[in-house]
Image: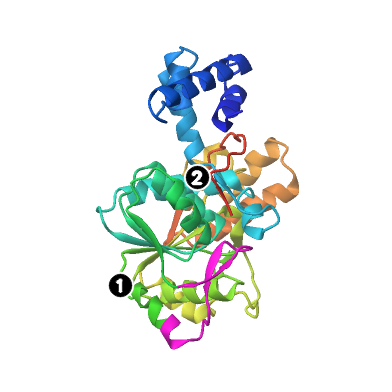
Amino acid sequence: MDRFGYRATQKFKHLTKRDICAALTEQIRQEWKHNGKADSLGKILMDMKRLTPEQLKNMLVAEIMEPNIDWGKETNFAKMLNIEKSAKQAIGEYIGMRIAGRPKGETIFLSNSSTIYYAFRGMVKYGAQVHVLTIHAAILAVYPSLKSNIRSVTTIWKGRVDLDNGLITPHDLGDSKTKAELGFLDGKVPHALISATGFDSQYGPMAGNATAREVSRRALQSQTHTCVLIDHSKLIAGTSKHEPALLFGEKEWREIRNRGDIEVVVNCHPQMPQEQASFDIALRSRHEIEKIMSQQKSSKQMINNVVSYQDCVMRLRNIIKEVPFVEVPSAMPHTEVKV
């Protein structure tokens, strides 16, 4: 059965297997009659009065933010696509709307990570008309199969595909040519989107992969406006200054954040009480958060997690953009590209 048809029956209980089979039969009939051309299954179901235009639109809009890529079930990247998925999609929606408002034909740099992948999906959803320069192997793989307004997607260097991290790695990271290929970050692109495996408000972002480390360091040290995209679980307090994944020391990070051309985009903690989540970060009350969550009979550990999150964003409030958390209903798996 067509994947769209299966997902439609899961979402709309009035649709039956018989409806989908009838729509598929009509699609095949149209293909034979019109030399391989046929309406989409969604339009056919709408013409059959089995889906309303609003139902079809809602389904297609929701599906746009799905991963839509099969990237090897055992890889780290594939697993990360579904960890804090709703949080990453919320960030992706925000970035998509924001980049869609940028001038047509601009070039935006995207680093690698599952969160960056959702940002790309958001750009597709909101019709961004930009060029994408990237080291993200999954974005490069999925782009040809997408109907979008993205003008082009190209990589900054030729290298090997690191399937585990969804990353294009150069042959020699220390080579002078490789370093020169990162020169576009020196003010030649207006925005760079990077991610982090962890983020400390005192020391800044963390990364373990050598290529991701080099690219992130260059982006944050450059003249390009750089956005660090992280879900709430990546905010960490009290990291040891000897942590090897840290990109910068305290002094260096302070100089970078004071420069005024970086920001951290994070989703609001999903367990933050609604009464407090609606307030600006600086107007929230630590006492009220604890009080409300206690009344809701939240566990002590969860209360500590939310308070810790609030403490972190409070220290970062001059550079942070907090995105409201919206729970996204899970959709049935759909594969566009197999790698």
Q: Position of residue 202 (x, y in %)?
A: 54, 71
* Left or right of 267 on screen, residue 184: left
- Name the mark on residue 90: 2
- Name the mark on residue 187: 1
Q: Residues within 10 Å of mark 2 (few under 14, many from 20)?
A: many
What residue appears at the point 44 percent right and 44 percent down from the top-left corner?
Answer: 93
Residue 267, compared with residue 3, is above or below; it is below
Please state which of residues 127 and 69 is positioned toward the viewer in this rendering.
69
State yes or no: residue 150 in magenta. Answer: no
Q: Is residue 268 among what the camera can see?
A: no
Q: Is residue 210 among what the camera can see?
A: yes
What residue appears at the point 53 percent right and 39 percent down from the top-left corner?
Answer: 326
Count every numbered label the image shows and give the total: 2
- C-alpha gap between disc 2 and disc 1: 28 Å
* Left or right of 73 on screen, residue 81: left
Q: Quadrant of the C terminus?
A: bottom right
Q: Amino acid at mark 1?
A: Gly
Please state which of residues 73 and 258 is positioned toward the viewer in this rendering.
73
Q: Position of residue 21 (x, y in %)?
A: 58, 19
Q: Position of residue 101 (x, y in %)?
A: 29, 48
* Left or right of 130 on screen, residue 330: right
Colour scheme used in the picture? rainbow
Residue 20, compared with residue 298, is above or below; it is above
Please state which of residues 12 and 309 is positioned toward the viewer in this rendering.
12
Q: Which residues are magenta?
A: 158-178
